Image (cartoon, helix red, strand yellow):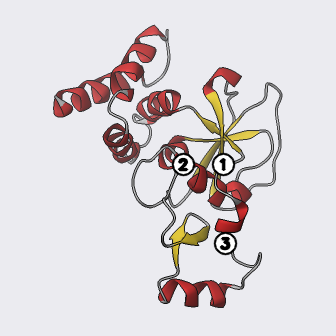
Amino acid sequence: MVHPAFLYLPGDRLSVPELSAARIDGYLVDLGEGYIPADLVESPSARAASIAGLIPVDTAASGPSAAWIHGAGDSPPARHHVRRAVGHRIRPALPPRVILHDTALPGAHVVLIGGIPVMTPERTMVDLALGLHRDESLRRWMLLLAHAEPSLVPAAAIALDAMIRVPGKRAGRGALERILVRTR
């Protein structure tokens, strides 16, 4: 887990102009909603901690946000995705850049990273594949996550095959097959 002393959020210890000056001088680099020292290794823990303020209570980072936390790509998604991580309905106050997917995420599919609940890597790949029929932009996150963790693709295909009557299963399975062929 990244130590809080190494994560600089705007307005916390330093103002936006001070953080910008430190970035221009090469002392800090952008990470999610904050900054980290330029010589600090960018880890899933640091990525998660940098967006912790956007993840409401009783939710978990999901979709492209979880993929980014798990190492997909260099930049976070423009809009962050969260899923309900509790069995009961919630009505969180959401920042404009956060999309809530109001389906319960089982506890077995949640890990704690950087102090926030995050969808597991395998479940993230499955969800990205299942959402592909509604949002083609998810394909980019699937490819980035597959590049970061190639073993997720066959594991996600097996998990998808075990699901019964799930919308988007056929399109998602096809996308996973194409990624498998591409990586062989």
Residue 44: image tag:
2
> SS class of the residue under badge 3?
loop
- The residue located at (39%, 14%) in the rendering is 158
Q: What crowding class fits label 1: few (fewer than 14 Cα within 10 Å), some (14-19), or many (20 or more)?
A: many
Residue 31: image tag:
none
Between 178 and 11, which is closer to the camera in this rendering? Answer: 11
Q: What crowding class fits label 2: few (fewer than 14 Cα within 10 Å), some (14-19), or many (20 or more)?
A: many
x, y (%) of residue 47? 56, 55
Q: Quadrant of the C terminus?
A: top left
- The residue located at (49%, 46%) in the rendering is 64
Residue 8: image tag:
3
Q: Earlier in the sequence, mark 1 or mark 3?
A: 3
Instruction: Give amino acid for label 2.
Output: Pro
Instruction: Give amino acid for label 1.
Output: Gly
Residue occupied by mark 1: 114
Estimate the spatial distance between the alpha carbons at disc 2 and disc 1, rounded to whole Å: 7 Å
Q: Earlier in the sequence, mark 3 or mark 2?
A: 3
x, y (%) of residue 72? 41, 48
Looking at the picture, does residue 86 appear above or below residue 114?
Answer: above
Looking at the picture, does residue 129 appear above or below residue 117?
Answer: above
Estimate the spatial distance between the alpha carbons at disc 1 and disc 3, rounded to whole Å: 14 Å
Q: Are marks 2 and 1 in contact (CB under 8 Å)?
A: yes
Estimate the spatial distance between the alpha carbons at disc 3 and disc 2, rounded to whole Å: 16 Å
